[in-house]
């Protein structure tokens, strides 16, 4: 199981919204500056202490609020490998996959301790937490897994076009 543990768990409650993830006051700046303020209203240490490989665990309705893609992009920029929650706001869910951030819906999450060793398997839709058996989440459709593997929607489409799996209509040229 230890090969699946990529980092630490960051645990947040219900209704974490896009303004908490990417505060509006910083939207005029680049992603690096926005990321410095990610979750500061909930956990002022998050942006400075999160590390590549860490997993965010949220409550219900994670990502509620505006459609700002920066709410997903800051998590990727900070190295978060996945977000696990019982439910996601629809626009955030779509943005997550479009930008290459795995989102795992797991309705029956056991209590997760902040800092607990954690990891995820997107292909198997499993969550790994040190000391307990793998948790099964809702399966991720294969086309979304492929998008994640390619780094998001734009790289996925570029790969499919380059490989001849997808053609561009003359109307779109």
Image (cartoon, rainbow, N blue to C red):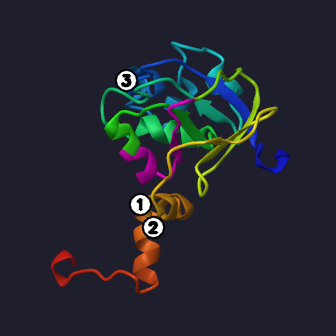
Q: Quadrant of residue 171?
A: bottom left
Q: Residue furthest bottom?
A: 164
Q: What is the distance, in whole Å, between disc 3 and disc 1 at their CAs?
A: 25 Å
Q: Which residue is mark 2?
A: 156
Range of magenta residues: 94-108
* 116 or 71: nearer the viewer: 116
SS at circle 1? helix
31 to the left or right of 18 = right
Q: At x 45% / y 58%, what residue is drawn?
A: 141
* 50 or 48: nearer the viewer: 50
Q: Earlier in the sequence, mark 3 or mark 1?
A: 3
Q: Does the residue at mark 3 contact the one at mark 1 (Cβ under 8 Å)?
A: no
Q: Does the residue at mark 2 contact the one at mark 1 (Cβ under 8 Å)?
A: yes
Q: Which mark is in front, 3 or 1?
A: 1
The image shows residue 144 at horizontal and vertical percentages of 45, 58
Instruction: Name the image quarter holding the C terminus.
Output: bottom left
Q: Which residue is mark 3?
A: 24
SS at circle 2? helix
Q: Which residue is mark 1?
A: 153
The image shows residue 50 at horizontal and vertical percentages of 68, 30
Task: Give the class, few, some or many, for how many residues have Cα within 10 Å of label 1's Cα (few <14, many ≥20).
Answer: some
Q: Which mark is in front, 2 or 3?
A: 2
- Can residue 129 be seen by looking at this rendering? yes
| In magenta stretch: residue 64 | no
139 to the left or right of 117 = left
Residue 108 to residue 14: above or below: below
Q: At x 61% / y 55%, what residue is drawn?
A: 124
The image shows residue 78 at horizontal and vertical percentages of 61, 37
SS at circle 3? helix
* 84 or 56: nearer the viewer: 84
Q: What is the distance, in whole Å, between disc 2 and disc 3 at their CAs?
A: 29 Å
Residue 3 to residue 157: above or below: above
């Amino acid at each position: 199981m230890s090969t699946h543990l990529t980092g630490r768990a960051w645990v947040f409650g219900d209704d974490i919204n896009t303004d908490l993830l990417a505060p509006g006051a910083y939207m005029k700046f680049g992603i690096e500056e926005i990321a410095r303020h990610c979750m500061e209203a909930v956990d002022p240490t998050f942006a400075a202490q999160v590390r590549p490989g860490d997993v965010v665990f949220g409550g219900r309705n994670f990502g509620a609020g505006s459609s700002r893609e920066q709410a997903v992009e800051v998590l990727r920029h900070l190295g978060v490998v996945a977000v696990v929650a019982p439910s996601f706001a629809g626009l955030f869910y779509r943005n997550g996959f479009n930008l290459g951030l795995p989102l795992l819906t797991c309705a029956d999450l056991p209590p997760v301790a902040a800092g607990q060793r954690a990891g995820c398997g997107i292909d198997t839709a499993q969550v790994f937490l040190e000391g307990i058996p793998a948790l099964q989440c809702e399966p991720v459709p294969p086309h979304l897994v492929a998008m994640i593997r390619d780094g998001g929607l734009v790289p996925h489409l570029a790969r499919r076009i380059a490989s001849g799996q997808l053609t561009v209509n003359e109307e779109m040229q």
